Amino acid sequence: MPDVTTELGDDYVAVVEMHRPPNNFFDVALISALADAYEELQGTECRAIVLCAEGRHFCAGADLTSGTERTVGDLYDQAVRLFAAELPVVAALEGAAIGGGLGLALSADFRVASPESRFAANFARLGFHHGFGLTVTLPQVIGRQAAHWLLYTGRRIGGEEAHALGMADRLVEAGAIRSEARAMAAELAASAPLSVRAIRATMRSGLPDAIREATNLEQELQNRLRLTADFAEGVRASSERREPNFKGS
């Protein structure tokens, strides 16, 4: 099974699915494959995309315990491609969207979740800086004050709170997330496709450039904080499922 599959239906809706269960940790290859899928669909009859994932969780971001994800700049180059793609995207957020996985979820135009869904920008609890353009997208979606609180605290929230904040556009039962996302995408696909692309380009004007600028700074700060004792402690505490003991060093 490839990391990413694409299925285009008769209703002009394409389902783009990640296949790295159960947590769908990403790396450069996975984000690049998603961007490739989006760009390839632009040349087809597709009018809207459903982004989903196999397994328990939508995406838990990068696997910081593996020691393999160090090409952050390349990763963010591919993330910018996602934001620059032309077709509207509805993300089906089953399980958790954590860290960079939340950044991936916020690259979509709309999000569907359930009360059991979980969200966290947990970077400060790991001892380093957020990434994937969350500097731009999180305050745009939920407002600056709420974004500050979630980023500073790394607090995890459920689907109902995410819906109240505007992070999730629709809240449905856990078993209905995909079908609701598909229904939303079909409604988008029923509008004039050239109009939708033009309106989307206007509404998201400058977004890829803003993401590029943000990720350049995010990457610089992530690289700096990866060298600290607090980062090592944060990752260790997370893997051991305990509270971190940060020293500010």
Image (spheres, rainbow, N blue to C red):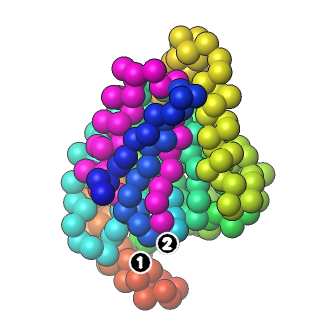
Pointer 1: what residue?
234
Identify which amino acid the numbered label 2 is placed on: Arg
Q: Is residue 150 left or right of residue 25?
A: right
Percent position of residue 135, x then y: 49, 45
Identify which amino acid the numbered label 1 is placed on: Gly
Percent position of residue 191, x then y: 65, 17
Pointer 2: what residue?
125
Percent position of residue 9, x then y: 51, 33
Q: Is residue 163 magenta?
A: no
Indicate the quadrant containing the N terminus: top left, top right, bottom left or bottom right: bottom left
199 vs 71, nearest the viewer = 199
Q: Residue at x 30, y 44 (%)?
A: 33
- Is residue 233 in view? no
Q: Residue at x 23, y 71 (%)?
A: 67
- Is residue 170 in view? yes
Examine the rendered structure and indicate whether residue 10 appears above or below residue 32.
above
245 vs 8, nearest the viewer = 8
**Magenta-colored span:** 26-55
Q: Are marks 2 and 1 in contact (CB under 8 Å)?
A: yes
Examine the rendered structure and indicate whether residue 204 appears above or below residue 167.
above
